[in-house]
Image: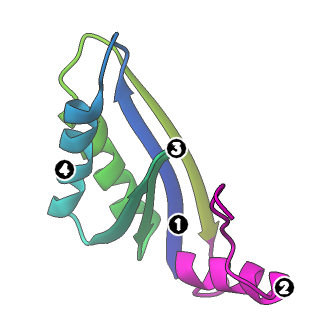
């Protein structure tokens, strides 16, 4: 089983949040998860929901601010194993091309 989640953790502050977001992402390294950060959040994969939630809690707690905003969306597909890359590949197969486009194109 693979649990996939989209996580966004950020302090509620004026100005740049990148230093605190980096702390949240770094906290994930202590867990048996894989992840990829993008401009809108971090996609995390874990073998089970308990591992995922422990990693998310650590990321949330790693942000040093008076107020922290955390958004979590979980896809816990229990009947099969499908990675985040598999999900993207399935969409790309239907598109017949990569699932991305640069504005310059």
Can you say which quadrant of the picture contains the C terminus?
bottom right
The residue segment tinted magenta is 77-105
Q: Which mark is residue 94?
A: 2
| Relative horizontal placement of residue 45, taking residue 25 as reference (left or right) | right
Q: Which mark is residue 27?
A: 4
Give whichever of discs 4 and 3 has the lower sequence position.
Answer: 4
In which quadrant of the rendered view does residue 11 lie? top left
Nearest to viewer (mark 2 / mark 1)? 2
In which quadrant of the rendered view does residue 101 lie? bottom right
Q: Secondary structure at mark 1?
A: strand
Provide residue 91's location: percent of width, then percent of height: 76, 79
Work out whether residue 26 or residue 60 is closer to the camera in this orientation and state it: 26
Provide residue 54's location: percent of width, then percent of height: 30, 52
Residue at x 19%, y 33% (from the top left corner): 19
Q: Residues within 10 Å of mark 1 (few under 14, many from 20)?
A: many
Determine which residue is flagged by label 1: 4
Reply above or below: 51 against 2: above
Q: Secondary structure at mark 3?
A: strand
| Relative horizontal placement of residue 93, taking residue 43 as reference (left or right) | right
Residue at x 19%, y 50% (from the top left corner): 27
Q: State yes or no: residue 59 in magenta.
A: no
Q: Which mark is residue 70?
A: none
Determine which residue is flagged by label 3: 72
| Mark 4 to mark 3 CA distance (whole Å) | 16 Å
Give whichever of discs 2 and 1 has the lower sequence position.
Answer: 1
| Mark 1 to mark 4 CA distance (whole Å) | 17 Å
């Amino acid at each position: 089983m693979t649990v996939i989640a989209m996580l966004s953790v950020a302090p509620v502050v004026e100005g740049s949040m990148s230093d605190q977001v980096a702390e949240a992402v770094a906290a994930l390294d202590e867990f048996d998860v894989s992840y990829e950060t993008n401009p809108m959040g971090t996609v995390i994969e874990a073998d089970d929901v308990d591992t995922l939630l422990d990693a998310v809690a650590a990321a949330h707690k790693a942000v040093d601010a008076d107020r922290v905003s955390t958004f979590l969306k979980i896809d816990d597909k229990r009947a099969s194993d499908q990675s985040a890359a598999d999900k993207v590949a399935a969409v790309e197969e239907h598109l017949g091309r990569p699932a991305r486009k640069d504005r310059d194109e």
